[in-house]
Amino acid sequence: MEFDARSVVGMRAAGIVAAQLPRDIPELTLGRTVGLKVGDRGHTCLSGIWPIPGLAGLILEPAFLDTKEHVPLWSGGGISLMARSMARGLQLALAPAGP
C-alpha cells in the first residue's frame, strides 16, 4: 500500500488494508505500507488528494507477488481472494470512528 507521506488519513487507511491482507491470506505474512514523497514513483498520482479532508489516496499493487508461496495467488481464485481482502480492509478504513 502506497500513500502520500503527508496524509495522516492515507497512512491510517494503508495500515488497515495492509493489516487485513495477512489475516485473510496466510501466504502473505506482511502487508507493506510506503509513504511516498515528492519525486517518488507514484507520488504525482496521490499528491492532489492528501489535503482533501477525510479523503485518502492509496496505490494498491496486488500483483506484486515475489515468493514461491505466492504462486497460488496467481490463479483466478487467488486474485479474487486478494480483491475481497483489500475491499474488507478499505471498508474498515472508511468506517466511521466509534464513540
Image (cartoon, rainbow, N blue to C red):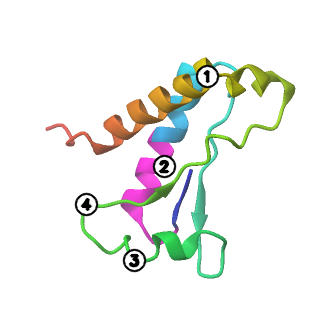
The location of residue 4, given as percent across then percent down, is 50, 68
Numbered mark located on residue 48 in the image: 3
**Above or below, 31 relative to 76:** below
The alpha-carbon separation of the residues under discs 2 and 3 comes to 17 Å
Tag 1–tag 3 contact (CB < 8 Å): no
Numbered mark located on residue 9 in the image: none
Q: Give the residue pinned by disc 4.
A: 54
In this view, the residue in front, 15 or 82, is 82
The location of residue 17, given as percent across then percent down, is 48, 39
Q: Residues within 10 Å of mark 3 (few under 14, many from 20)?
A: few
Mark toward the start of the polypeptide (1 vs 3): 3
Local secondary structure at mark 4: loop
Residues shaded magenta: 5-16
The alpha-carbon separation of the residues under discs 1 and 4 comes to 33 Å
**Above or below, 98 relative to 33:** above
The alpha-carbon separation of the residues under discs 2 and 4 comes to 14 Å
Residue found farthest to the bottom: 39
Q: Give the residue pinned by disc 2.
A: 14
User: Which kind of residue does numbered mark 4 sit on?
Assistant: Gly
Mark toward the start of the polypeptide (4 vs 3): 3
Instruction: Name which residue lies at 52% across and 68% down.
Output: 5
Local secondary structure at mark 1: helix
Q: Residues within 10 Å of mark 4 (few under 14, many from 20)?
A: few
The alpha-carbon separation of the residues under discs 1 and 3 comes to 34 Å
The location of residue 45, given as percent across then percent down, is 50, 71
The mark closer to the camera, 1 or 2, is 1
**Above or below, 45 relative to 60:** below
The alpha-carbon separation of the residues under discs 1 and 2 comes to 24 Å
Question: Most prominent secondary structure in the magenta stretch?
Answer: helix
Tag 4–tag 3 contact (CB < 8 Å): no
The alpha-carbon separation of the residues under discs 4 and 3 comes to 13 Å
User: Which kind of residue does numbered mark 3 sit on?
Assistant: Gly
